[in-house]
Every structure is written in C-alpha cells, then in structure tokens.
Image (tube, coloured by chain):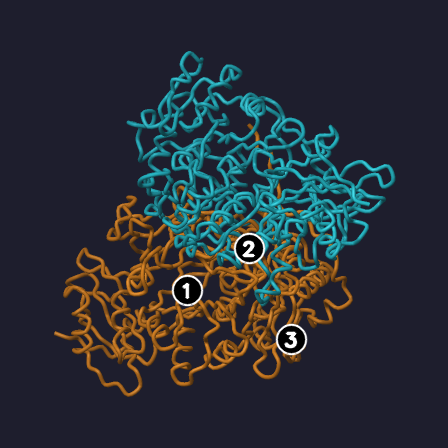
Chain colours: A orange, B cyan
C-alpha cells in the first residue's frame, strides 16, 4: 500500500513565509545600549530578508555557496538566517570569539566569498582580510567605521544601501530538497582545527519544531524570547528559526552581553524565556545580587553549553525567584539533546535530583551509553559510559571543505553512524541523563574513574568558592589524580584543609584531591566553557602554585 | 556543499521505542464503566505491542498489508496503533458508526485479512462477515460473546491468548522508509463511497510533533489527555501517537462516551486536556448543568470536527469555568489544520472574536483561498473562497484499493497538488481562518453567498433553541434561499416571527430565511456532524412541515 500524503519538503523557506505572513505582527527588538531599541515586525523582517536575497543574488551568490556572518544577535542577523538558506545558499555563522587564526581558518575552509559583518566587529575582521583571499565582498551591518577596510581587496557594501531598492514582496525562491545544506557552524574544539557541521533544511526545521515543544523551550505567540546565546554559536540553539516559526517575539541583545545591560533589557522589555551558558548566568546573578531588577517576566532561564552548577540554579531560585532549567547539547546536535524538566507529579523539593541532571531526550534523539569495552550499557543510573546519539538533527560527519567529501573521523562517529559525543555519563531507567565528565577530562585513577565535574560542583557549592576546576594530573602510583584549582570569593581566606573536609562529606575518600592551587579565574574557551587544556598545560609548565596535602 | 546530518527516518517505530523506554512510567487508563479502570504503563504497552507484532507476524501479516481495527478507545487499541505500523503493516481503523454497507465496503476496498475487534462490537461485525471474504482472522479484544461468530469463515482468536507467550522485549523491527504507509482511514463522506487516506510514518510523526506543540494541544509528561474523539476517527486527531511521543498519560473512555460517564471519568481521573466534537460537548454541558462535577483538572477542551457554536463555548466558560478551544481539520489533514488560540496580549473579552474563528495554521500547513473564478484571494478577512491547503501531513490523493494506484480526483486536488478542502471561508491578514460554510452548503442567493453556518450559530445562540440547521432550497426568483430547521428546547413555544426578528438583529435583511420548520433533532452523520443532505432530501420529499413567512 502506498501513502497518499503530499510530498512537501521541510525548509527554512517555509519558516520565512509562515512567520512573515501568519505572525507578521510579532516583533524582533534589538537592544541598542542607549535610547530606544530597534524594533521590526516579522512582516518587515520577511520583506527585508527578501530584499537581502535579491542583493546577494546580485553579488553572484549561487545555490550551495556559503555566506559568512560575523555578527551579534540582532535584526539584520535574523534576516540573514532566513534569506540565505531560503535562496539555497548556506548561512555560515562565524564565531567571533575564536582565536584570529582559527577564524581565518574556517573562512578559508568554507571558502566564504561574501561576509556580512556587524559594524562594531570591523576591527576584528580587518586584520584577517589580508589572509582571506576567498572573500570578495564585505557587507557592513549597522554603524561602523569602514576606513579600516581601506586598501584591502574585498568590495565593501553597506547593508542598508545594498538591500534598498530590491523588491520586498517577491523572490523566485528555488525548490529546495530538504536534505540540502542550509547552515554551517564550526565547533570551537579545543584541540585540532575546528570542524564544520553542515545543517540541512530538514534538520533545522525539525529542530525548530522541537524547540517550540513545551518540554523544550515552549515557544508560542504569547512568549518573548531573549537568546543570550550568540547566533554564531550553534544557531543560537535554534531559537531564531523556532521563534519565527512559532510567532514568538525576539529580544536581541546585540553586543550588550554584560550583566548590567542584560538585567536592564530584561527589566524593560520583559522577555518570558531566555537561554545562555552558565557563565552568563553567573554574571547576571552577581549583578542582581548587587542591584536587584524586576525579573518577573521570565518564566524560564535555560542554561546549556556546559553543566550548570546546582548552587547557581538554587541561588537564582532562592534569591531572585528565577527558574533555571538545564539543557544539554553540542554543535553536532543542533544542539537540542536533552532538557531537565522533572517528571510528572514531582514536588519542588523532590524535583532537584532531576533538575541537576542533563534531563531527558526528545523522541527524535536516540541515546546509548558505550562502556570501556565497546559494550552497550544498561540505563540503570549507575553504569557510566560514553554517550552516543542518533537522530535527524544529529551530525553524522564533518564538512570536508570546499569541493571535498564530508569527513567521518572514527573517534567522532561509530561505524553504524552514531555520533560519539565525547561525554561520559549515566542514564536512569526513566531516561534522565547525567553527564559526569568529558571522556578526555575524566580522571583515570587506579582503574577507577573520578568525575572532575562532580568534584567541581561540590566545590562550587562552598559559600567561599567563586569557581573551581578539577583536572587530571599524572601520578606515579595511580596513573592520574585530581588537581583542584580554586577561585575564592573576594575577601575569603578559607584554607585547603577546610575545602577538602567539605568535599570529604560529599564524595568517597579515595576521590579527594591531594593537589590544590589558587587561581585568579578558571581559563575559558571562546564560548565560555572551562578550558581544562590550559590548566593542564599550566600545571605541566609549573605555572601553578600547587600545595599537596598529606 | 553537502549537509553532514545523519539520515534518520521519522517513524512510528521510534515513537514506540521512545515512549516505552523514556516515558515507561506514564499510564494509559481505560475506563471500564464500573469498578477500577484498567491501568497499564507505557512500558507495559510497549511490551504488549511487541508481543502483538510477533502474534500478527505469526498470522502471516506482511509489510504493507492492512490490519483492521474495529475498536473503542482503549489500551489494546493503543497497542495496535504502535505495533502495526512499526512492523511495517498498515493500521486500518474502521469507523464503527458508518452504515453497515459502507463498513463492509471499506474492509473489502482495503482488503483487510486480519481484523481486531472490541468484544462489545462483535454483534456489529458478525452480520458483515458473510460479505467479507477477505477477512481470514478475527482477533477479539476484551470480553465479548464470540458465539455470534460460530459457523462463520474467519478464524477467531482472543487477543490476550494470541499475544501471550510471545517475547515482550524484542522484535526485529524492519527498517522503515518514512514515506511508507503506516495507517489508513476512510472519510465518512456523505456522498459517494468513502475515500481512504493513507498516512505515512513521516506524516504521523510530524503531525504528532505538532500536536505536542503548545499552540496545538501542548502535551508534556505533566499532562493527562482524554481523547473523546474516537480512535477510528482520523487517528483520534493524532493524540495517541503524540501522547506516546511526549510521555503524556492517556485516559481512554472505551465505549463510555455518554455525558454521565464522561463527567464521572473526568472528575475521578482528572485529565488536563480533552478533545472531541461539539455534539459531545453539547451533551456534557447539559449533564453538568443538571449535575455539576469537579472539572477543575481540565485546562483545555479542544472542539473540532465541525464548527463549535460560540454559545456553547461561552456556556462552558461562564457556567463551568472550562476553556473550550476550537480547532479545524479533516481526515485529509491528519487532521490538525488550525487551532484558535487568540494572539499575544489580547485580554479575555477581546479574545472572543479570535476564539470563534477556526484559528491559525501551524508552519507546516500552508493555506490559500481560491475564489469562484479560480483566482487566489487576499488574506483580508472579507474575501471568501474555497480553502486549499498543502503540507507534509496533508493528503495529495486517495487510496485506490488493493493493488491499485492512488486516485487524485480533480474536485479534491488542484492540478498543483493542493488539497481542496471543500470549505469556504476568509483569512485575516494575521492568519485567522474563519470558515463560513461548506462549499456544497453555502446558499447561492441571487449572485450572493449566504453562509448557512452563520445563520445556524445565531439561531443556536437564542436561549430557546437547542439546535438549528440551515440548508439551501430551490427558489424560483433567487436560485436558492435558506430554510431554517429548528429544534426547540423542551417546553419552549417561541414562534418563527420571534426567531426571525432575533436573527434580523444580527445579519443583513436579505439573508433572513423565509422558510422555517420545526424538527425533533438535526440529522447527523456517523461522526456527529450535521447531515444537511438528509434535510435537503426531507424538504424535497415533502417530509418537513414548512412555514413560509411573508
């Protein structure tokens, strides 16, 4: 028997048309730091995206070609998010926090011929351009002094001038195969060259549907979403496309990602849901502690990108009435992998053991745990293995570069096509994932595994500890042992013995670190994750002042 | 540039695996009329579905083969919903309210070899079987006297005995192409033979994702859903598959669809969301008016299948605090077409003009209005045309019967593949659809169109009118004119002149019916819709006592 359903592809083109028409009065508001924010309706965004498509086509942008964006979260970037995939080209979001040589690498690897850049980021782009022969056109969005580009080879355009005069009401959008490339994002991998993940129209569309789901972000026309997570970081976790699909108004922070302006924009624009990495929330918490603001519009603060310290979640709830929900994902998972809503019928206090996990996967994300010997482990809440995932918005390969086939490195993809996440953890019988560590960060001590993250979370729950990172260091007797690197709160003088005693009440004795160091701040990657590679190197190079307890 | 995403199909198999594992403790509760309801966890349902797949394979059920179900809403039917598509076969839900000859027609047209039947429905099936040579196996679910099948040709099995002994923990589920047939449902068309719509795994999966969306039903593990809409009626609007996907517990009414047991099961099992046709809610309202129950668990009552009279929605809200949300769809649309949530920032009183529309379409359902001359009409809230829709869960053809190609009748599908819904209406600039009539029911009076539905709604808002139907009748001068057929409330003696005066305050004078008739009840189709064909025939045959007002 044959299905009699229509064969209609899942495309960004459809998201663009739907949001601009059915939800034309929804708004994207871009924070400007001072004065009135910039406000555009979805109808206007749709019209301007259509103009942008005409303008890019006039520059010769072809189907399948990448268009780079080096931009903050704002209305223009949203237009590129919609226009570029819809015209059949590939949105390549450039992570402005990558080291310059990596940024140059990914522009060359993708072979970006056109780059749209926020005016405020011209000083970042200009010094790279002499190393970017592939770039022929630079389109400057917003204000910014273009004289830094004088004498460089690309042609320079102003975004507003470039799109002006093009029709806003029609474009011959090409027929799209839903498996066609739509967007490209490179991992901010801490080792080796960044790897490109090429999202398809299908994966973006399905992921956006899931982002709208109430077990994820719950986007409806009644909500306003503040994506603090940058649009150059895994498509801002899918929120721009999902919001346009759902008719959810967007509040865009542009470059104002510091705690004070974030608190101000939340108080004045009243978003209902927001998303970002723990480091951002840590900063916002300190800001609110120092100067309380009205945060009552926020029903949910989603935290992802790295594990959110439970102490941070509790502090937000107790001191500011904010509900922090933890989510897990990575560039290779689009990124929605799991969200930690407690199960049905569980009261506020009983909910904590669930809320501090990485949560449950949606139906479209299938998970398995692989043990040290390659065996599939049971979901019993205790068997720890590497998490592998499969699904329609999970990567199965990396971009091989212009004209090359995709690459499928063995350490990243299993022979049967699952993504090896590099995360180690457990899953309970009812599907709650707890990541205990990165496979590369877990401390292999005498044939047992010690989770660096667990030790960090306990340490960061200590009232005098601002931040803490635990890394494996070589040990003659045990192979590896944990080193605790601690950032104390201003004015604190707590000693290592007290911290170890505090830990000793919470983990097994054999897991307690012998080696301790005070550091001014935990080194972080370009997206705010703890950069343990740096700490390990500092230890190896003797740059840390280490005290060894007996 | 090639996408690097995994190519993972969207299948019912995945819904089965996910619900049974990640949401294994969610429950399906089947009402039993008296005594304790039958309760099964999703884990148990998953195990029993696996056993059922083994049992059906042992009966020789092959991939692509239909398996008929003539069943109420209950746990066994849910198992068939999951097992049959997952094993590659096609779930063919049989509408037990069809006239017997139509029921026999669809079993033969689909060539069902195996039929699962609720024991209480054996008296309905038995007399048909002599006309159903194709049926080789009858599987009886639940209690029921099988002696009515004695001497008939099919082999008879008891569901519990048939699945017992088969493994519950594994089955070699076949690899599924997401465009493969998964389920078959025939329209309850009031003219001609019923037409079969064959849903694919892809369409069911995408539709289930949308059903979970907060702008549709908003299913999460915290919800309990009561599908009053039968599982033989467009897959119970996708709720069983969506609930299993989301981990939403299900309350199944089995055959207890009368107002009193519905009120009882809501009061005692406390579902949070329910869905059914207006006729059911009309009955429940009368029941609650007579004997109030605790309905406070229900956050949303979704009404679809035919237009819900605004008076009914208001009565529920004012007298029982229940929020009735109108939705539109049809067998050919899976059925989720549109849902009438008001737009953002609209207060309770301002919301009514939106709530009485058919609502807005989700991103995956694209709509256009086609005028009398075939032209595409603007979305201006006034231009009325036939609604055509396109999308991944919209039918593009009908089942041609066993071994035949799908059929694509011109009056049902446009040359470019859109579904012609047969509904006439308007769409506002912000996407709110208002259906004013069926294309075949609209009254063509002197070159103008009069909406029969609008007149009915106004009449049913009159306090002494229980029901009213308006149909077109031939008129020498105007071509057609409206006839109002009215059911008065018990004890009412309101006269036609008063009713016409009441209408005259609400619609243009030229739309007022001249012809009036009192009837004991509005004739209804097997799924509870007004059957205007019957009324038109009764008028033509002189069976109505018609009064013509001057």
- Disc 3 sits on a residue from what chain? A
Q: Which residue of the protein is positioned furthest toward the bottom in this rendering?
A: A491
B534 is higher (above) or lower (below) than B493:
above
Depth check: B1 or B377 in front?
Answer: B377
Q: Is residue A440 visible?
A: no
Distance in Å between CA atoms under marks 2 and 1: 49 Å
Depth check: A170 or B337 in front?
Answer: B337
Q: Are marks 3 and 1 on the same chain?
A: yes
Q: Which residue is tagged 2? A: B315
Q: Is residue A432 visible?
A: yes
- Image-based side of B57 in relation to A240, left or right: left
Q: Are marks 2 and 3 on the same chain?
A: no
Q: Which residue is tagged 3? A: A142
Question: From the image, which quarter does the C terminus of chain B lie in?
Answer: top right
Residue A123 drawn at (x, y percent)? 58, 78
Residue A24 drawn at (x, y percent)? 66, 62
Task: Give the numbered dot on residue A490.
Answer: none
The reply to whether the C-beta atoms of the residues labelled 3 and 1 are less than 8 Å apart is no
- Residue neighbourhood size for the residue with mark 1, other residues' Cα within 10 Å, grouped as few (<14), some (14–19), many (≥20): many
Depth check: A503 or B154 in front?
Answer: B154
- Give the structural element (helix, strand or loop) at label 2: helix
**For residue A477, which quarter of the picture?**
bottom left
B481 is higher (above) or lower (below) than A204:
above
- Disc 2 sits on a residue from what chain? B
- Give the structural element (helix, strand or loop) at label 3: loop
Q: Which residue of the protein is positioned furthest toward the left in this rendering?
A: A550
Q: Which residue is tagged 1? A: A305
- Residue neighbourhood size for the residue with mark 3, other residues' Cα within 10 Å, grouped as few (<14), some (14–19), many (≥20): some
């Amino acid at each position: 028997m044959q299905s009699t359903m229509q064969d209609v592809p899942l495309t960004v083109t459809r998201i663009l048309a739907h949001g601009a028409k059915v939800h034309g009065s929804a708004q994207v508001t871009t924070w400007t730091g001072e004065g009135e924010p910039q406000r555009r309706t979805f109808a206007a965004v749709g019209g301007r995206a259509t103009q942008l498509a005409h303008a890019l086509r006039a520059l010769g942008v072809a189907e399948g070609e990448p268009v780079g964006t080096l931009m903050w979260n704002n209305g223009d970037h949203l237009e590129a998010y919609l226009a570029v995939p819809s015209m059949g080209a590939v949105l390549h979001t450039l992570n402005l926090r990558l080291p310059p040589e990596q940024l140059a690498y990914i522009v060359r690897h993708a072979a970006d011929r056109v780059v749209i850049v926020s005016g405020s980021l011209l000083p970042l782009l200009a010094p790279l351009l002499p190393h970017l022969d592939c770039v022929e056109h630079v389109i400057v969005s917003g204000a910014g002094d273009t004289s830094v580009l004088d004498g460089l080879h690309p042609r320079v355009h102003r975004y507003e001038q470039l799109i002006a005069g093009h029709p806003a009401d029609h474009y011959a959008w090409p027929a799209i195969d839903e498996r066609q490339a739509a967007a490209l994002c490179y991992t901010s991998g801490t080792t080796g060259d960044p790897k490109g993940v090429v999202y398809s129209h299908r994966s973006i569309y399905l992921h956006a549907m899931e982002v709208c789901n109430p077990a994820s972000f719950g986007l409806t026309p009644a909500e306003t979403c503040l994506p603090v997570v940058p649009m150059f970081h895994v498509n801002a976790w899918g929120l721009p496309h999902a919001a346009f699909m759902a008719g959810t108004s967007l509040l865009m922070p542009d470059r104002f990602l510091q705690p004070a302006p974030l608190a101000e924009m939340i108080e004045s624009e009243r978003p209902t849901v927001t998303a970002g990495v723990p480091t951002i929330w840590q900063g916002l918490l300190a800001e609110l502690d120092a100067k309380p603001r009205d945060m009552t519009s926020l029903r949910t603060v989603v935290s992802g990108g790295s594990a959110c310290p439970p102490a941070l979640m509790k502090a937000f709830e107790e001191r500011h009435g904010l509900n922090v929900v933890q989510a897990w994902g990575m560039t290779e998972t689009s990124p929605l992998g799991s969200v930690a809503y407690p199960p049905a019928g569980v009261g506020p206090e009983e909910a904590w053991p669930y809320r501090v996990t990485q949560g449950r996967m949606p139906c479209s994300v299938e998970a398995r745990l692989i043990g040290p010997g390659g065996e599939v482990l049971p979901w019993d809440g205790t068997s720890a293995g590497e998490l592998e995932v499969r699904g329609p918005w999970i990567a199965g390969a990396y971009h091989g570069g212009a004209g090359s086939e995709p690459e499928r490195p063995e350490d990243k993809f299993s022979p049967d096509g699952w993504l090896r996440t590099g995360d180690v953890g457990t899953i309970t019988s009812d599907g709650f994932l707890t990541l205990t560590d990165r496979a590369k960060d877990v401390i292999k001590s005498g044939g047992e595994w010690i989770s660096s993250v667990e030790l960090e979370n306990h340490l960061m729950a200590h009232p005098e500890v601002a931040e803490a990172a635990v890394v494996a260091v070589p040990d003659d007797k045990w192979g590896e042992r944990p080193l605790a690197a601690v950032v104390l709160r201003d004015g604190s003088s707590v000693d290592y013995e007290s911290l170890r005693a505090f830990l000793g009440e919470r983990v097994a004795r054999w897991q307690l670190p012998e080696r301790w160091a005070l550091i001014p701040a935990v080194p972080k990657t370009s997206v705010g994750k703890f950069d343990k590679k740096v700490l390990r190197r500092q230890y190896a190079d003797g740059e840390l002042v280490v005290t060894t307890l007996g």
